[in-house]
Image (cartoon, rainbow, N blue to C red):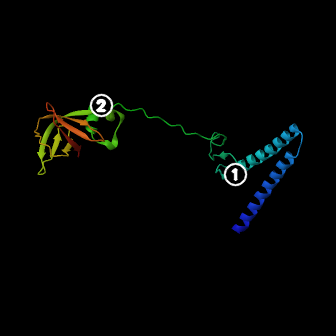
Amino acid sequence: MKRLLLTITIFACSNAMAFDNQRWLDCSNINNNDDRLACYDRVAKSIQSRETIRSDNAVSSSDDVPEQPLVISSSSAEATQLISEPIIPVKIEKQEEQISAAEIEAGFGLEHKKTQQEEDTESVSFTIEKAKKSIHGKWTLWFDNGQKWQTISSEKLKFKAGQDVKISRGVFNSFVLNVEGSNRTVKVKRTK
């Protein structure tokens, strides 16, 4: 069955092409320049209109748009009107909320939920509430706002409760901790 359809399609296309080729050849046999040009224009216009009709048929048959207008079934008179134009959804733009400094500080380091204001914040200062050194030489630091950070490397730094530190953004979403009044830094990650 498929072979039969394919054969018929190829035969129909080749006949149409042969017919068009014959019309072009007939035009080329005309000696008068103006008449020959007019003949070429007629052949080209007929081919173009035939292609336009084919493409229009292909588009209308491939679309899932119903031919008849959509009727809404409801009891109200307004709802029973025909919809003649498509309904275009309107995108409602959210206004960016203003975030306080405390909220920015609370979310600092939680990179999976960043706002533009948090991205613009380059550093935050904290006061150490508790500091504990692991057996591997890495520090776990608890701050007065409830955040918990851990050093990534085991640098020779000492931390104690009450110290003021500053955590800054590094490259590639890393964070660097700096003790106030010191030039030494250590890379840290937020754990809580």
Q: Where is residue 158 in the image (x, y as percent from the top left)?
A: 10, 40
Residue under numbered circle 2:
100
Q: Where is residue 7 in the image (x, y as percent from the top left)?
A: 74, 65
- Residue assigned mark 1: 58
Contact (CB < 8 A) between labels 2 and 1? no
| Pointer 1 local density, CA inside 10 Å: few below 14, some 14–19, many at least 20 | few
- Residue 6 in the image, given as x and y percentages of width and height: 71, 64
**Alpha carbon of mark 2 to alpha carbon of mark 1: how far?**
57 Å
The quadrant of the picture occupied by the C terminus is: top left
At label 2, the amino acid type is: Ser
Q: What residue is drawn where x is 17% and y is 42%?
A: 142
- Nearer-the-camera pick, 90 or 28: 28
- Mark 2 vs mark 1, foreground winner is 1
Q: Is residue 190 left or right of residue 55?
A: left
Q: What residue type is labelled 1?
A: Ala
Q: In this view, does 73 lie above or below 176?
A: below
Q: Is mark 2 on a helix, strand or loop?
A: loop
The quarter of the rendered structure image containing the N terminus is: bottom right
In-front residue for pair 164/16: 16
Indicate the quadrant where residue 84 lies: top right
Q: Is mark 1 on a helix, strand or loop?
A: helix
Is 81 left, or right, of 148 in this rendering?
right
